[in-house]
Amino acid sequence: MNMWLWLISLATLMVLALLLWPALRRRWVTGPIMVQMQRAMPPLSRTEQEALESGSVWWERELFSGKPDWEKLIALPADTLTREEHAFLDGPVERLCASLDNWRIQKDTNDLPDHIWAMLKREGFFGMIIPPAYGGLGFSARAHSAVVSKIASRSVTAAVTVMVPNSLGPAELLMRYGSDAQRQHYLPRLARGDEIPCFALTSPRAGSDAGAIPDSGVVCRERFKGQQLLGVRLNWDKRYITLAPVATLLGLAFKLYDPDHLLSDEQERGITLALIPTHLPGISIGTRHDPLGVPFLNGPTRGHDVFIPMDYLIGGEQGIGQGWRMLMACLAEGRGISLPALSVGAAKLATRSSSAYARVRSQFGLSIGRFEGVQEALGRMGLNTYRMEAARAMTVSALDQGERPAVAAGIVKYHLTEGMRQSVNDAMDLWGGGAICRGPHNMMAQAYQAVPIGITVEGANILTRTMMIFGQGAIRAHPYLLKEIECLNSDRPRDARIARFDALLIAHIGHTLRNGLRAFSYGLLGSHGAHVPQGVNPAELKGYRQLSHWSAAFAFMADLALARLGGSLKRKESLSALLGDALSHLYLASAVLNHFRDCEYPEHDRPLMEAAFADSMQQVRRALMGVVSNFPDRLVAMVMRLAVFPTGMRQQSLAQHHLHRVAELLQRSGPARDHLTEGIYLGGTDGSDPMAELEKAFVAVQRTEKLERRFNRWVKKQRHQPQLCKGLHIAEGYLRRALEEEIVTELEAKQLRDTIDRRMQVVRVDEFPAVCWLGKEVAA
């Protein structure tokens, strides 16, 4: 017995010596691990390296740490719009929305009318991001987002047209990477709308794998405008390019080759960007795609043996081979503004219109918003819209502070476009046939048509979820992983690399163990003891504790998955997607709490905040349960389960009282509904716009609710009297009898007639003479 005890003690001492003595540990433990990892890990390609280096890392790093620094988030200022930005939204943007006739655009012109194009140019819509020094508006990311969101609530076609020149395109690229001469020449022309830009990246053989573009340029010498110049002969075939049919300035991504070594000894020079006037010989533009009937200008562009001088390259010769880095850096910002803003505008429109319709439309003697099935849909729309607005606001605030959070931008692009899909689908269900029959009174049809567009562009959502959010986030945002990869790929002496790797690995292991212990203790104690920030509303501390708890749980499980699966996790896309879902909803839940704090804790918003937060936390738990249930190594899965779910895994859904409370809140006029849908177009002052009609009916129904209830109770007591029913005007007959019997006064009868008329205006659907389908007439 003593011999066995002695042997166990000796073995323990040897292991401890091996782990605690750095020289021995590096020789026998970390050195061999480093060699194995170098063999197992494929080298990073140049495009992968540039994608990882693009943008910055922001709040997502705190979530990966397992112990978020809440003071960092609280220190983020709640940016407000400047006087000039407010004036632009209340002036030119309001006038633009009032001038847009979505139905005419879609059925008649199939494009924005000439006077709208002129207005966009005249008022500077195409130069929102261009500094005033070049004639632009120089707006903040918040203002840029607010403009796109408001226009999107009126017309997706107009929103996309405004969005593209201010997103990834020539202006953004010139401001960051263009030469002084290029900026001085092009930026004022872009700001005035003298040049209509587009940017061509996607090709038939390179969609989501944009780094595989086959479009090429060959360095050569040719005559150009009477001179023999060094330049590039280009050939390309691009598609899905917004504004290409009318563009005068084409931004182009291509691979540059120098077979004659006119620039250097290197033949393949990498992805390069150029700005090309579209009037040059060999360029083909003008034909259009039809993106599901949403008539913004989108089409292909092709070029055959198009020669351009070297100064047409963005940044000149210094920009050669830098194209992918330029694109990734700009995309990290553009993804966080344009499509999220469009999605929020559509979700706000869906929520405000549907909440009014649910109150105005009645069936079985009740407003349809009284039925719990309708309340579930309306409640989802409300919490979804609140969460989307919170994420939009937090992300653009970070952008305005100089951050370029690539992972956060991917999160908001994916989840806000998916949120638009969910909200618009719920609205379609709620409106029923009124949303199916297209026409000038249908507010949801174009938003429904546009849903797949946002889902697909700027990174298809399937790939964004399964490959990018966690795949890129794990490397960029993890406190040690990128440093370890850089160490493995370093050209430093072997001993120096082993020493560096040893220090990183030990710190990484400690990080993982600490997060595992945190997750286990918080799981047992119901999040009690988790880190919370100072100076926040005490009522919100529980939410911060939950976020700290599940951040530790996520970080621990992510480390175990990376340690066990290594590089193969990249191919386990379903697991990567679940980990990405957990990371995303931690980010979204953080945005919800931050938005509530920025708005100074308004009690009227509390039901929305609590529902949105509870739903995101439920999504985090569900995603991590999915990882445990589907992890291929069941021993590691058991460790995950014991550490993260010590009291057991229980599938839960969002409590229905959250949805019902939100639905009831939104069916009343008040600050909560107005704040939630702030910033969208609500119709002109003349009241003829469908949204304005709906809002007036919504107000009228609330004003006469008690009166209608009293009148309807009296009607039910009357026996059916045919003489009171003239055609379908049953209510009018009973109203006259009620007046005669002094059940209602003249004023009350007038109010009831007004409510009934407004309700009928709202529930009617558009109809057209048969000849309009033959192209001879379009409904007014």
Image (tube, rainbow, N blue to C red):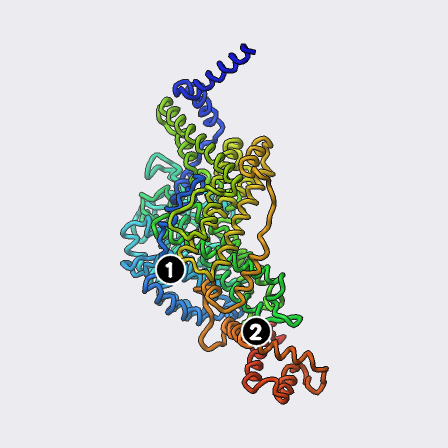
Q: In which quarter of the view is residue 358 placed?
A: bottom right
Dot 2: element: helix
How crowded pointer 2 is (Cα within 10 Å; few <14, some 14-19, many 20+) is rated as many
Left or right for 751, reference 716: left
Report the disc number at residue 320: none
Q: Residue at x 45, y 32 (%)?
A: 43
Dot 1: element: helix
Q: Nearer the viewer, residue 163 or 30?
A: 30
Q: Nearer the viewer, residue 30 or 40?
A: 30
Q: Looking at the image, how many numbered discs can be counted on the residues?
A: 2
Q: In which quarter of the view is residue 268 placed?
A: top left
Q: Are marks 2 and 1 in contact (CB under 8 Å)?
A: no
Residue under numbered circle 1 = 143
Q: Quadrant of the N terminus?
A: top right
Q: Nearer the viewer, residue 646 or 550?
A: 646
- In percent of width and height, residue 25 lies at 42, 20
- In percent of width and height, residue 648 lies at 59, 39
Q: Residue at x 68, y 86 (%)?
A: 724
Amino acid beneath label 1: Ala
Residue under numbered circle 2 = 762
Q: Is residue 279 visible?
A: no
In the depicted structure, whether residue 202 falls above or below residue 158? above
How crowded pointer 1 is (Cα within 10 Å; few <14, some 14-19, many 20+) is rated as many
In the depicted structure, whether residue 209 falls above or below residue 127? above
